[in-house]
Image: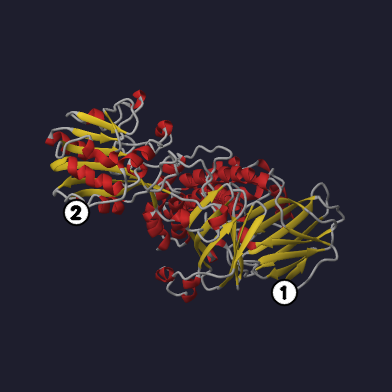
Amino acid sequence: GYFDTRAESSPPASALACGFAYRHFKECVNAGLYDEALPSRDRLARVYRERYGLALARPVLEAGKIPFNLTGALFFSGILELNGLRRPGKAAEAFAAAVEAGDLLQESQNPFGLRDGETEALLAQSRRHLPMALAAAEPVPAARKIAAPRTSLTARLFSRFRPSRPFLIAERFVSPAARLSEVVLPLDVIARRPAARLRIVLLAAGTRDYRAATLADPRLSPEESLRLEFAPFDAPAGTPFLLGVLDLSGETEAPAAADLQALRAAAGGRPPIVLGCRGVGERTATDKLTDEHGITVFRVGAPGLSGARAVYGLDAFWCDAHGFYLRGWAHAHEHRMRALRVESAGCAARVDTFSDRPDLLAHYPGHEHVRHGGFAVYLACPPGHPVRLTLETDGGPASFLLPLPEGPLPPWPRSPDGDYDDISPMLRRFVELANARGGRVLQVGARTPPSLAGMPPRPLLRGPVTGLDIHPGHCVDLVGDAHFLSRFLRAGSVDAVVSGSVLEHLQAPWLFAAEVNRVLKPGGLIYHEAPGAWPAHAQPNDFWRMSAEGLRALFGPESGFEVLEARDAGPVAMIPGPAWRERHLDMPTVPAFAMAEILARKVAEIAPGAVAWPLRAGASEERARRYPVEGLRLAPESRS
């Protein structure tokens, strides 16, 4: 599918690879495709290792350095081990690591006032599945591994229930309202099975005042919620409450014993959570399910779409000190999107016009409206804060915390065609051909500080090297204007000409190309490197930028050369300033290249005057001498 394709095509240590590999693994596990999930997990493990230096099997976790989707990766790894590979011991290790990762991640988000709902749900699921995995691995010792207040009823359930049948939800929460009279309990964070008998218990901590109810076969959707209404508690705002939900299916325990067990479990040291609560006088009542033991339970329509009912993909992301840009797509399956919002650091942007993405039809063939799911948005806010994406659909909202790069990014992998930081493969080929040919080599722009005299290509060339520059200096044999080489060298007197980061400083590089042809012997070689996308430097003598195609035109057949090789090298991103940003938001996502290089051979003489320009020698040399003597430190670092 889409996530599999994008995971394979993304750079292996990139944020895109991490996001798409995780989404594919999650989808495989959710669909029960365990044969596909196993290699998908292996790929995700490789991405974590390359991007974060983490071993997915046994991650070493540090606060503030938790990848956003690690909790989910560990939870779904546990499900794969438990239900697919039938290795409950391994599953227990994964669930325990998921709990630790989720807690650390949520703690790191507290300074921003955020509690990510998806991570909360995964934490709850991991906590519920951990004792089940322990019980399946070693039923008797499992009871001793759970906190003592939980052992009386749950030990028997551990040993009897299958791992796929959750049984207990126990939470503490603090009421934001005085005289609490309502709690909304989302079912997507409650482990439940169809036709369950649920026992719900609520107690004001430190008192004997509690409410309870039993739901027999409620047949609720995970996208729905339970609204619990009850006689108000005589308690001020900020009172802690204990909430327990127990699956009593097949149990014969008396309700009072179950209530006590659930409340003891809820008090077992878990941190408080925040639930939807209301005080007295604010209640509404619709779709009643049951009314007993002091609690009236109502069905509440889905407040939004769960993560499984909506998907998104990010194709491009960039940020600078002023804000960040996202381009991608979103899809809510059978539901149509009306708009989406991106929020971060107190800033928000809304998108209600979507672009065409016909490529998504191949991945969601049953949903024609997916073709209108593309979006692009720029948010002007400080970077580095959590970013939330919310889809507004006709089925309700769906919200995601985006796993964007948190920095510092890992180093880029080495180029597959060689160590370009030392010497480019094309320059190495030039050196090999020049050494095989023999004879004199002319190096244009040869002035080099003594500390850099050992840089290639000069030390690699076996024949004599003549250095030319507009200023005298180390490695310079001839001082003069490169536009008029034939004034310093006889025609057909050199076997090769090489330069690096010189062409951009020549007023008329086409005259230089013609002069190179004149001083070269037939069959002589040239290699030139020049910047493409590069900041201005060595002012005021910074005239041009070159591409590989530009170099092909400059040193092509019209100038008497046969091009052996030419290419753009050194990918870079260009970020527009605020004045240009609105019309050029995609600029950082379009490939640009720092340098261009060419290797060519002289195959023909060019007629005198074939290349002309009204450039007088004296004026040209005077202008050339404006190149700053210290300009070498400001120019692109030449690799030639």
Question: In the shown orientation, is residue 41 left or right of residue 250?
Answer: left
> In which quarter of the view is residue 529 placed?
top left
Tag of residue 287: 1
Q: Amino acid at mark 2?
A: Pro
Q: Which residue is at the front of the view, 509 or 184? A: 509
Whether residue 633 sits left or right of residue 119 in the image: it is: left
The residue that disc 2 covers is: 557
Q: Quadrant of the C terminus?
A: top left
What amino acid does circle 1 point to? Answer: Asp
Q: Earlier in the sequence, mark 2 or mark 1?
A: 1
Which of the numbered marks, if any, corresponds to residue 139?
none
Residue sitting at x 44%, y 49%: 573
In the picture, measured across the screen, residue 443 lies left or right of residue 125, that is: left
- Badge nearest the viewer, 2 or 1: 2
Q: Position of residue 353 (x, y in %)?
A: 56, 70
Is 477 placed above or below 62 here?
Answer: above
Location of residue 286 (image quadrant)? bottom right
Residue 93 or 208: which is nearer the viewer? 93
Residue that lies at the very extreme toward the right in this rendered image: 234
Residue located 40% across and 48% down the image = 533
CA–CA distance in space, label 2 to label 1: 83 Å
Q: Quadrant of the N terminus?
A: bottom left
Could you say whether the residue bearing mark 2 is in a helix, strand or loop?
helix
Q: Nearer the viewer, residue 476 or 422?
A: 476
Q: Element at badge 1?
A: loop
Q: Is residue 190 visible?
A: no
Q: Would you identify the image quadrant in which residue 169 lies?
A: bottom right
- For image coordinates 39% across by 70% down, the residue present is 362
Circles 2 and 1 in contact, beta carbons < 8 Å? no
Observer able to see residue 492: yes
Residue 463 at x, y = what percent?
17, 29
